[in-house]
Image (cartoon, grey):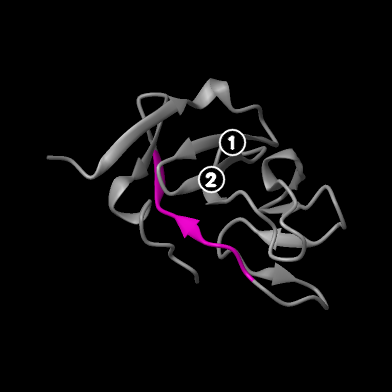
Amino acid sequence: MTNWIDIAALDAVPVRGARMIKTAHGCIAVFRTSTDEVFALDNACPHKQGPLAEGIVHGKAVTCPLHNWVISLETGQVQGVDEGSVGTYPVRVEAGRILVDRTMLGHKAVA
């Protein structure tokens, strides 16, 4: 059995945007950068649980729509003067489809 789950077409996630995916263990946000890199994080900002999938993607970071906290898409770490982190998930793209590692959906991987 493969550990990778097909969750969406790459084209379903806008360039410099995100989509929220519901899982049995909570919601994750899948992000696509301007260079078509894909990242997956918990959808809730560590500050006030803002919906990160609704944030602004810039470079390899997302800015929370509630209070402008900037979070690294690579590590899940809050950048700047604020502190905190969100869980990250292994993700890859194959044949135009986004795959996430099913083994990590029940175990948050905080960098």
The answer to whether residue 101 is seen in the rendering is yes
| Residue of label 2 | 28
- Residue at 43%, 65% in the rendered image: 109
Q: Which mark is residue 102?
A: none
Confirm or deny contact between disc 1 and disc 2 (CB under 8 A).
Answer: yes
Question: Observer-nearest residue: 38 or 88?
Answer: 88
Q: Is residue 88 magenta?
A: yes
Could one spot residue 38 in this view of the protein? no
Name the residue type under label 1: Met
Segment colored magenta: 85-92
Q: Residues within 10 Å of mark 1 (few under 14, many from 20)?
A: some
Position of residue 95 in the picture relative to residue 26 (left or right): left
Callout 2, which amino acid? Ile
Q: Which residue appears farthest toward the right when viewing the image?
A: 67
The answer for how far apart the CA atoms under marks 1 and 2 are is 6 Å
Secondary element under disc 1, as helix, strand or loop, is strand
User: On the picture, is 36 further left or further right than 63?
Assistant: left
Q: Is residue 55 left or right of residue 77?
A: right
Q: Position of residue 14 (x, y in %)?
A: 65, 27
Residue indicated by mark 1:
20
Seen as rendered, the residue at the extreme left is: 1
Residue 14 is a magenta residue: no
Residue at the (41%, 46%) spot, across then down:
91
- N-terminal of the pair, mark 1 or mark 2, is 1
Q: Is residue 3 above or below residue 104?
A: above
